[in-house]
Image (cartoon, rainbow, N blue to C red):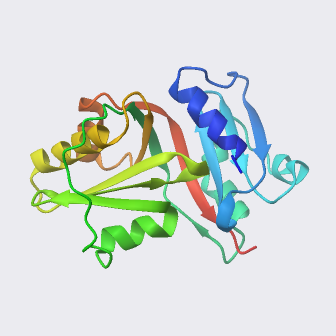
Amino acid sequence: MRHPLLDFLTDAAEGRFPPVDGGVTVLPPLAGGWECSVAFTGHAVVATARTADEVMAQGPDGYGTSMSPDFLRWLAGPTGSTGVIDVMLVARGTGKPALPVRTDLDDHPRVTYARQYRSDVVVYGDERGLITIGAGLAGRRELSVEASSHNLGHGTALIAEAVNLTPAGELLFAAVSPGNARSLRAFLSLSFTPIGSECLIRPER
């Protein structure tokens, strides 16, 4: 079933953002027991099994506190886990695939990591490194890359290949740590647009 958060993400990718009202929209939890907090400009969206009254009693707002460590820890519970806060980026595919599918990398740490958070993950790659593309947050098409060296050109080239692997005009999302300036610059140089921030939660529930 389509999670309602996907509509928020798709709308934002197409320039239709939630109202800048400081509000918080509370949605049902994600598939597989995951929850999340997503921040747009002046509005937040929280997907959780907790009730809207419980969430709002914690005092989150759309101006930043929905991403505060205290609120994220409350969502996760004492023994749950919180992910990192990432920048959400999006671009449109060009539909010019050039990389082969790789079926020999199932044990690669990047592939194992991707499959913890995404379903239907497909792996591509060559001597420059690898790309994973799968269904991520709320079912969106999401990528990650890992270059085979610290060559910045390889990483940028792999991101460009991921855009080519995506059907023309369709959305491709990425989540990048704001502290990873090199990666963030690479995505921005390839016309990825920032639309908000996100944090995945694995609650004790």
Count every numbered label the image shows and give the total: 0
The residue that appears at 42% across and 35% down in the rendered structure is: 90
The residue that appears at 77% across and 38% down in the rendered structure is: 25
- In the displayed structure, does residue 165 sit left or right of residue 54? left
The residue that appears at 63% across and 41% down in the rendered structure is: 6
Quarter of the C terminus within the rendering:
bottom right
Can you give x and y, in whole percent of width and height, for residue 51 in the image? 87, 54
Can you give x and y, in whole percent of width and height, for residue 167 in the image? 38, 36
- In the displayed structure, does residue 168 sit left or right of residue 129? right
Of residue 93 and residue 152, the one placed in the foreground of this image is 93
Q: Is residue 64 visible?
A: no
Of residue 35 and residue 157, the one placed in the foreground of this image is 157
Q: Is residue 181 visible?
A: yes
Can you give x and y, in whole percent of width and height, for residue 72 in the image? 65, 57
Indicate whether 161 appears above or below 135.
above
Residue 107's quadrant in the figure? bottom left
Indicate whether 101 appears above or below 66.
below
Indicate whether 165 appears above or below 189.
below
- In the displayed structure, does residue 31 sit left or right of residue 106? right
Q: Residue furthest right?
A: 53
Residue 104's quadrant in the figure? bottom left
Indicate whether 120 appears above or below 195.
below
- In the displayed structure, does residue 11 sit left or right of residue 170? right
Can you give x and y, in whole percent of width and height, for residue 96 in the image? 25, 36
Of residue 65 and residue 136, the one placed in the foreground of this image is 136
